[in-house]
Amino acid sequence: MKKVIAILSVLVLFTAFSVIVLQTPSDILYLLNWGEYISMDMVAKFEKENNCQVVLETVTSSEAMYQKITSNTTSYDIAIPGDYVVTQLYDEGYLMKADVENTDYEYLSGYKTAFADNLSDMMDKYMVDKEGAGFSSYYFPYFWGAYSMIYNESNPEVESVIHSKGFEALYNRNLYSSNVKIGMYDTSRWIVASYLMSKGLDPNITSYDGSHEGDLSIEIQNDVINILKEVKFDEFGNDSLKRNVATGSLDMCFTQLGDFFDTLYLVYDEASFDGNVDFNVYIPDTTAAFFDSMVIPKTCQNYDLANAFINFMMNPENAYENACAVGYSPTLKGVADKYHEAAANGEFYYESDTPEKSLTLSDFLDKYPMYLNPLYGSANAYMLEPKSSRYLTTCETIFNNLA
């Protein structure tokens, strides 16, 4: 197995106003994506097969992607936002329906049955419009995962508390007999969501009576403020958190599942790696799943090429190669089947001339079953729902005043 790490000399990030292209506009696909979230080999393969050029622009959050799409300043043909932003974009009329009738979507026969069962269940429940109807022809799940905790195994008490208390392990220092260093993502909505899930609550509620509407109640706001003052997180960050847990400068952090697998591969790839992995990941019983999807924004100028890109990336062969390169959990059952076939054939997750630095794919899947099923072992899973700008502003205010 291989993993592609984006390097600026290989992956140049373009904007619609600065790129110099060789093809005519009809030969260009403008792709809005996250950083290090697609195999450049697959991009090159798509360009060759379709005689086109892919122009890639990246963002760091779904909210930023929402702003990019709704500003109408760039004609993106494909975007890959998070699930609740997909719903928001659809409800507000910013998405186009894929041409599933005239384009060869043979790889999505049955659509719902093509994706992992737990993911399909979440799609049925959460990916609905304001009238409660589904809109599956407007989005195509790309990678998925669950909110989780990465922890360093050097302190056995940390693992014990995390496995018994879930996200409460982040917010209650009284659970430990010694001082532990805890990291939290600097995404304000995730802070509120993780706090609610630490109480076993739906991360989408806006008040303790169970309402999902309007702004956060004063009671929840005060509780979040007070717990942040009490817990005093040792670090607010993003990509730095997973690295600091791996090196032992943090005992644990709140994160996305894909961050763990990204860090795992990078550790195996270090020249100084001795074969010992002393950090792990845990997905609590109460958590939230998430997935990013390929969508066609209303700004699309090359509709046929956009459909061709979705169909290309939904081909299980291509999706498998892409997953191997990127390292996040694949959404298609056909890709999971290919992982199991590769494992049975003795392929490696990481292969090295030094045996202790190698990890077979079979051992990888046995040790980390949540890779192919991010909700493995979780009994109470949610997804984040679209929220009003007022709600998001309140989350930001709480974070900015206390971080």
Image (cartoon, helix red, strand yellow):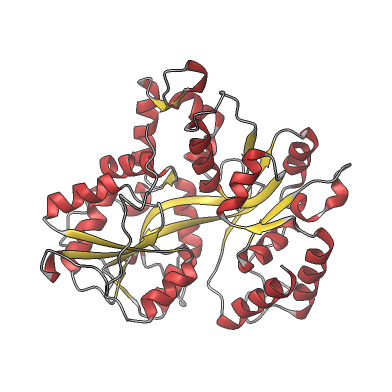
Q: Quadrant of residue 327?
A: top left
Which residue lies most toward the front here? 9
Residue 128 appears at what percent x and percent y?
45, 69
Pick whichever, 366 or 208, lies toward us.
366
Is residue 39 at least partly visible in the picture? yes
Q: In the rendered view of the protein, which quadrant contains the C terminus?
A: bottom right
Q: Nearer the viewer, residue 45 or 138?
A: 45
Name the side, left or right, on which 256 lies relative to 199. left
| Residue in view at x 25 percent, y 51 percent | 43
Q: Decide if residue 99 is in sight here.
A: no
From this view, report whether residue 74 is shown above or below residue 253. below
**Does 142 sit left or right of 47 as displayed?**
right
Residue occupying image coordinates x 32% and y 51%: 9
* Percent x, y of residue 144: 46, 51
Looking at the picture, tell me which residue is in the foreground, 210 or 42.
42
Residue 248 x, y percent position in the rendering: 69, 39
Q: Is residue 101 above or below residue 396?
A: above
Quadrant where the N terminus is found in the figure: top left
Q: Quadrant of residue 56?
A: bottom left
Q: Count every numbered label the image shows and give the total.
A: 0
Q: Position of residue 309 (x, y in %)?
A: 23, 57
In front of the other: 376 or 388 = 388
Residue at the (45%, 45%) spot, across then down? 328
Position of 208 with respect to 254 (left or right) is right
The residue lying at 56 percent from left, 29 percent from top is 367
